[in-house]
Amino acid sequence: GKRFGHYTSNISESLNSKILAERDSLPFQAFQSLIRKDASNLVKKREMYANIVRDIYPNLAKTFRDNVNTCCRLYTMYRTDDWKFELVSTTKSFVVDLDAKTCTCLHFQDNLFPCLYASLLIYSLSLLSQNFMSFLYLMSSLRDTYTTGVTMIATDELQMCNLSESQKPIVQKRSGRP
């Protein structure tokens, strides 16, 4: 957003808060410190996610169960094709195509996650819910994010560069708002 005449974003604000300690360092030292922080965070996350057996985030599994419980008694299901269904209540009706992963409520295609009505069908047909979700919702994709490590740069090679000419950035804080 635009604050105090400057354009900022959550990403830039988040990054600035992470590098506070390194901002007053020499560029090489700051770079080295940030790489070490990232490497240790990566190892922590890899260890944390390696032990999770389920393939769906626990909170998403709960959302899926809640969806089923919400509309289980309210809708009657009619099969119109192999993977197409119509769910009808006294006031509404929705068409769900499980093969195309779409619903007339549009939540299925917008969120890439089964909506209330698709959840009910998936549960009723005893299908695996993760087959109808984007890979982004699966724990396996999160685990895969942290499988590779960070390759550290040999500091001996960098020391050969003329780093003595590198200087700290000049940061002058002005009074008042930025």
Image: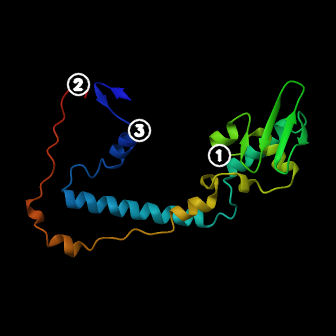
Marks 2/3: CA distance?
Answer: 22 Å
Residue mark closest to the camera, 1 vs 3? 1
Amino acid type for the residue under numbered disc 1: Leu
Question: Of the residues tagged 2 and 3, which is closer to the observer?
Answer: 3
| 121 vs 152: above or below | above
What is the number of the mark on residue 10?
3
* Circle nearer the N terminus (2, 3): 3
The quarter holding residue 55 reads: bottom right
- The x, y position of residue 83, in whole percent, is 82, 50
Task: From this view, report whether residue 5 is shown above or below residue 133.
Answer: above
Give the structural element (helix, strand or loop) at label 3: helix
Relative placement, left or right, of 140 versus 125 is: left
Identify the mark nearer the N-term, 1 or 2: 1
Q: In terms of secondary structure, where does tag 1 sit?
A: loop
Residue drawn 33% across the image and 44% down it: 16
CA distance for labels 1 and 2:
46 Å
Q: Which residue is mark 2?
A: 176
Report the disc number at residue 152: none
Numbered badge on residue 112: 1
Question: Is residue 166 or residue 142 the one in the foreground?
Answer: 142
Could you say where residue 138 lies in the image, as x and y percent from the top left?
A: 64, 56
Q: Are marks 1 and 2 in contact (CB under 8 Å)?
A: no
Residue type at mark 3: give it. Asn
**Callout 2 amino acid:** Gly
Callout 1 crowding tier (Cα within 10 Å): few <14, some 14–19, many ≥20 = some
Label 1 or label 2, whichever lies nearer to me, is 1
